[in-house]
Amino acid sequence: MFYDIQPEEQKQRYKQMLSIIGKLTRLFSESNCPYLPYRVQENVFCKYFEADNLARSDCSADAKKNRIGVGLKTWMGGDDQKVAEFDSLRERFCNLQGLELVKKIAEFRNERIRITKNLHGIDEMVYHIVKRVPNSMQILEHAFEAIDIEHIVLIPNRGNGNNTYFTDGKHTYHFSMSKNTLYMIFDDMILLDSFNVDILDDPYSYLMGLADNFAQFTTPSEQPIDTTNKICLRLYSTKSNGDKYVFEKSGLNQWNACGRVRDPNEIYIPFPSEDRERNVGFFPPRDQPFDLLLPDGTTISAKICQADGKAIMSNPNKVLGEWLLRKVFELSEGTLLTYQMLEVFGIDCVIFTKLDELKYSIDFAEIGTYERFYNLDNIDE
């Protein structure tokens, strides 16, 4: 379990903050069950347990500490809860049924867990749940495991044409075809802690009473959050008909290019002209080395390369491929990376963040992030 091995002071402060938030329930609900937005839970968990917040990284874990990945959940009702969505992969399973369907969904689920662990340097994973019951919160944890595909068995006489229930002998799941969503029944949770929450009858008066103290926390020097220190780049290209693909002889498959003999790990991240034009000056000049922090905490040397600075490579350029192709994706040498693979992995672009002069980080983002990042409807090469 994660919670039991955390310092007692951190656990107390975590519970205290959750209780404070729960006191304000009447701002949002008339329920006697404390209100707790999931984004608030994520932020509170990471702040008080000093964990890395992965919730915006669009991976299977919401937080990470000491090589433990944590899936964060909060709910009031039943224990049948969503664990994964597969909207972008619907065409690959929409014609499947029964055992064939759930095995395919299990493959997709396991691939995303594997990629998350490899990307972020995670050895084990656990679900951490805050369950809200009348006037109280419970802290529970539950195993977070890959699905044992070899032991999947359908559960008869349960569900309907839209929902298929199954078990792998360890956990029970169901897949909703209409929602493209996999649910797991959290029926083996371990209760680790609980505490009362005194819900305020009139949180408005309480907050109004704090108004006189707000000025000391706000100064004219406060500035809006700087959003100019990030850029998003695609790992794919787009055909005129809108189909996405990965170049077979460049980019993430540069090792397959013609000409000189190449190292099987040679890759680069494309930095096409339209992205260079909208992000002028974000990176150092061509061939100027900079530090690049990978999601697992490793720092490598990288630089802008090739004509017009159209490529971002590690230095030497095989280092990035050794990490991404071999350690993260676990592809054997000579295997072409395809966009269909990226769809299964659940990622198709990267976000670079400028941390300091000559220091950047890179994170992998879910499918569709590039279009949302730049508010684009269509991407044309």
Image (cartoon, rainbow, N blue to C red):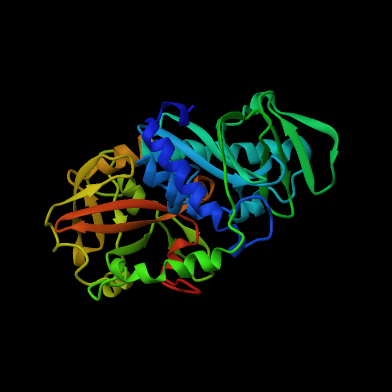
Closer-to-camera residue (209/247): 209
Task: Give the quadrant of residue 148.
Answer: top right
Give the quarter of the figure containing the C terminus: bottom left
- Compared to residue 351, the image places residue 221 above or below, namely below
- Compared to residue 321, the image places residue 243 above or below, namely below
Task: Give the quadrant of residue 319.
Answer: top left
Q: Position of residue 1 (x, y in %)?
A: 49, 26
- Compared to residue 223, the image places residue 64 above or below, namely above
Closer-to-camera residue (180/44): 44
- Left or right of 175? Residue 304 is left
Q: Residue furthest left?
A: 288
- Compared to residue 150, the image places residue 186 above or below, namely below
- Left or right of 289? Residue 191 is right
Question: Which residue does the image show at 30% across and 57% down from the upper left?
Answer: 352
Q: How many marks?
A: 0
Determine if residue 249 is in view.
Answer: no
Closer-to-camera residue (107/209): 209
Q: Position of residue 229 (x, y in %)?
A: 27, 65
Q: Position of residue 305 (x, y in %)?
A: 19, 58
Question: Which residue does the image show at 31% across and 68% down from the upper left?
Answer: 225
Closer-to-camera residue (280/55): 55
Determine if residue 11 is in view.
Answer: yes
Q: Position of residue 71 (x, y in %)?
A: 51, 40
Question: Which residue does the image show at 69% across and 55% down from the upper left?
Answer: 31
